[in-house]
Image (cartoon, coloured by chain):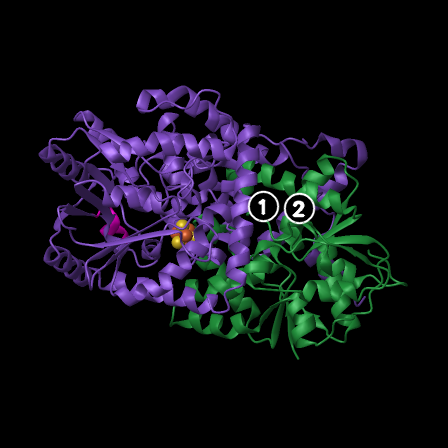
């Protein structure tokens, strides 16, 4: 079986990536500030929606129903898009999707394309694949632009450059814009308005020149064949309307049965992602506009495999709002790069190993990149029980042998209460034998994996008498 | 009412004071709890680390040990969450294990639920003249939704000065084997929690879970911060005449 590609090579295990990220105080500060700001915004606009629980339940139910009948709705979508003058292509994996898009661009004779921010094209590594054929893809979302100019990787679903602050962005613009088109103005400051201005001038030229655009979609309506993109900057609208050819790469799970379903998702998504009541730029198109050519590439890339897993399939309900990232205490401290995938944070910790399998050390470590605190489940607008899926994936992971031995030993002790009592007595005796001075002989820092605890934390003292020994001795304190 | 105490393996082995405090507190409130001797561990560590088979074995023997009581009291939010949330999934829908689980699960209460919901008391007659802050552990907060039960109980404790904890809903970074498997991230999360605790100026940090307290307390201790960690039960057990221990 070929390995599903997710935009980044699977490398070192998560804890090692995390250790590096944790040492970067600038990153820690940037992330803390950014996630806390979005988190607070989301919390306030969700709190003010009186029917949030009902909306969330409706979102969950619509997605669940759609996934159960995905085959039917996908065919209906294909029919509707075709009837409206669009062309539909089916891609089983990243390589096939990239090949289809490359052929389509080549057929136009163009060597440049503009892009609307899209997770699906990040996932398949489309920009890199196009470049191999001499086609340059220009990102037009501000944060994606920052990532592209900085030769960097996205670290957040919604704000790919969340790990950068404005001083760093100023440097990236000043240094690299000229290599990609109109240079940044002289004496560019790190004032947000000045930075946005520089990006606007740089991008405007690009929009007016380029004849092919590539997008993803937040939703695809089976009933009407309508595609929907939500964005905040208006760059998407430019890409969707100006070029002659539009190619949209969309994961098969993005389909919704009816137009009416948007009522639910256009409320859930903006409040969960940017913390806004209403999304600023919502573009919808059905088939090809006059004088335009439209292609829809429907992408599987591991999704049908996930669909076959009864517990895990709920991950396909995800609408990529990133609320779970913003609220995750692990993500907040290590950022997105540690997850080694375009899908970071809690959703990435499940979706990446689900799509890519658990063949690599990194992918095996991802389901463990969580304290199971449950904050992600609480905020998820489609009620994906991420902690349960994490635990489910953990049962499938290959465990390291020292851990297996430890778990087997613990299981053996807990199998009989007498064994536990004997172990407790042994611990108590050790304690009595090593009062005061001798007690110090017990190492304050333990070797091996247990050292992870004692590096930063004291161990609790073992009591001389366990609870059950006390209960037996005193008849539950009655003697 | 026949009440069983499921003390949990962590309390049994490392924090017997908590178990004793629960017994004494309940006795003061007129409830003689039984300690079913066959109990050991609820299986949470195995379940959450991905050892489902061992977890099923431990869950099966736990419900066998605890069945037949009118209520099972658990002085741990996360073990109570394990029993209430995961046991039904582990037990499946039919068979003796499923039957026993169906009997035990709805009668399982975390300590503050038992006090407030079953016994209907919020003033347990405790006296604890210290500045205290309360950390609602994740499984207490988002797992079994303890809500403000612990705070309601603490507010009635005579002499106790309750200090609100900043960033109260954030995870402390314990997460069971997460603390070992992702020790660096766990420590970073704990460092922030410790900072929040110190900001309150409290002498005592309390919670409904000794495992999280062992983690936060381990760092408070390593820093020689002078802040003590205590299970909520021990505070509720303390009176003018009987001290904490
Ligand atoms: S898992 Fe839920 S919260 Fe996370 S990005 Fe997807 S929809 Fe949003």
Q: Is residue B239 above or below residue A130?
A: below
- Please tell me which of labels 1 and 2 falls first in the chain: 1
User: Where on the picture, by quarter, is residue A5?
Assistant: top left
Ligand 1 lies under 8 Å from the Cβ of mark 1 = no
Q: Name the one closer to the observer, B150 or A167.
A: A167
Q: Which residue is mark 2?
A: B214
Q: Name the one closer to the observer, B10 or A28.
A: A28
- Looking at the image, the residue that sits furthest to the right is B241
The numbered mark 2 sits on a residue in which chain?
B
Alpha-carbon span between mark 1 and mark 2:
9 Å
Which chain corresponds to the colour green? B
Q: Is residue B79 left or right of residue A109?
A: right
Instruction: Give the residues drawn in magenta, as a range.
Output: A299-306
Q: Residues within 10 Å of mark 1 (few under 14, many from 20)?
A: many
Q: Which residue is mark 1?
A: B174
Which quadrant of the figure contains the C terminus of chain B? bottom right
Are marks 1 and 2 in one subunit? yes
Q: Name the one closer to the observer, B130 or A80.
A: A80
Mark 1–mark 2 contact, CB under 8 Å?
yes
- Residue name at image x 51 percent, y 54 percent: A42
The hue of chain A in the figure is: purple
Which quadrant of the figure contains the N terminus of chain B? bottom right
Query: Residue B149: in sight, yes or no?
Result: yes
- Provide residue A253's location: percent of width, then percent of height: 26, 54
- Provide residue A131's location: percent of width, then percent of height: 22, 27
What is the secondary structure assignment of the residue under circle 1?
loop
Query: Residue A340: in sight, yes or no?
Result: no
- Looking at the image, the residue that sits furthest to the bottom is B1
């Amino acid at each position: 079986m070929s390995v599903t590609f997710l935009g980044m090579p699977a490398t070192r295990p998560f804890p090692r990536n995390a250790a590096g990220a944790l040492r970067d105080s600038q990153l820690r500060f940037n992330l803390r500030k950014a996630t806390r700001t979005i988190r607070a915004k989301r919390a306030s606009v969700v709190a003010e929606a009186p029917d949030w629980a009902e909306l969330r339940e409706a979102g969950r139910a619509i997605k669940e129903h759609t996934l159960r009948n995905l085959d039917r709705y996908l065919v209906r979508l294909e029919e509707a898009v075709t009837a409206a003058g669009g062309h539909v292509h089916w891609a089983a994996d990243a390589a096939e999707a990239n090949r289809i898009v490359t052929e389509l661009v080549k057929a136009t004779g163009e060597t440049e394309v503009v892009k609307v921010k899209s997770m699906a094209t990040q996932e398949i590594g489309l920009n890199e694949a196009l470049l191999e054929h001499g086609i340059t893809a220009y990102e037009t979302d501000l944060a994606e632009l920052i990532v592209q100019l900085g030769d960097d990787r996205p670290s957040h679903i919604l704000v790919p450059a969340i790990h950068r602050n404005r001083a760093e962005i100023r440097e990236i613009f000043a240094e690299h814009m000229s290599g990609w088109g109109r240079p940044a103005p002289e004496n560019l400051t790190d004032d947000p308005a000045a930075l946005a201005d520089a990006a606007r001038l740089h991008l405007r030229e690009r929009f007016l020149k380029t004849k092919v655009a590539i997008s993803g979609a937040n939703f695809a309506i089976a009933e009407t064949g309508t595609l929907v993109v939500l964005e905040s900057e208006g760059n998407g609208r430019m890409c969707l309307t100006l070029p002659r050819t539009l190619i949209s790469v969309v994961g098969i799970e993005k389909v919704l049965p009816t137009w009416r379903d948007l009522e639910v998702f256009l409320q859930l998504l903006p409040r969960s992602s940017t913390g806004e009541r209403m999304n600023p730029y919502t573009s919808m198109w059905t088939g090809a506009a006059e004088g335009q050519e439209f292609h829809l590439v429907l992408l599987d890339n591991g999704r049908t495999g996930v669909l076959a897993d009864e517990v895990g399939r709920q991950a396909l309900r995800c609408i990529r709002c990133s609320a779970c990232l913003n609220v995750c205490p692990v993500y907040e401290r290590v950022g997105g790069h540690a997850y080694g995938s375009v899908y970071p944070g809690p959703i990435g910790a499940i979706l990446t190993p689900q799509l890519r399998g658990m063949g690599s050390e990194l992918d095996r470590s991802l389901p463990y990149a969580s304290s199971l605190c449950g904050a992600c489940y609480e905020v998820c607008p489609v009620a994906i029980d991420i902690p349960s899926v994490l635990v489910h994936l953990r049962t499938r992971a290959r465990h390291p042998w020292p851990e297996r031995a430890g778990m087997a030993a613990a299981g053996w002790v807990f199998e009989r209460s007498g064994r536990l009592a004997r172990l407790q007595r042994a611990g108590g005796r050790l304690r009595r034998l090593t009062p005061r001075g001798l007690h110090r002989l017990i190492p304050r820092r333990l070797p091996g994996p247990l050292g992870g605890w004692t590096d930063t934390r004291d161990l609790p003292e073992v009591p001389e008498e366990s609870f059950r020994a006390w209960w037996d001795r005193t008849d539950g304190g009655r003697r | 009412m026949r009440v069983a105490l499921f003390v949990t393996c962590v309390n049994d082995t490392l924090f017997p004071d908590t178990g004793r405090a629960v017994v004494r507190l309940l006795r003061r409130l007129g409830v003689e709890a039984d300690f079913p001797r066959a109990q050991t561990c609820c299986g949470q560590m195995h379940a959450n680390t991905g050892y489902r088979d061992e977890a099923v074995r431990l869950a099966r023997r736990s419900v066998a040990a605890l069945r037949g009581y009118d209520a099972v009291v658990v002085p741990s939010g996360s073990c109570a969450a394990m029993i209430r949330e995961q046991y039904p999934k582990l037990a499946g829908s039919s068979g003796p294990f499923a039957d026993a689980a169906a009997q035990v699960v709805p009668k399982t209460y975390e300590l503050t639920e038992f006090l407030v919901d079953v016994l209907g008391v919020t003033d347990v007659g405790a006296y604890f003249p210290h500045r205290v802050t309360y950390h609602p552990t994740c499984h207490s907060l988002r797992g079994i939704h303890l809500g403000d039960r612990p705070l309601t109980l603490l507010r009635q404790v005579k002499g106790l000065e309750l200090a609100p904890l900043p960033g109260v809903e954030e995870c402390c970074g314990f997460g069971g084997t997460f603390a070992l498997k992702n020790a660096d991230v766990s420590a970073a999360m704990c460092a922030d929690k410790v900072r929040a605790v110190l900001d309150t100026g409290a002498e005592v940090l309390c919670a409904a879970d000794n495992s999280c307290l062992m983690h936060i307390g381990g760092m408070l201790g390593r820093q020689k911060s002078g802040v003590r960690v205590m299970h909520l039960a021990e505070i509720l057990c303390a009176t003018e005449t009987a001290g904490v221990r």
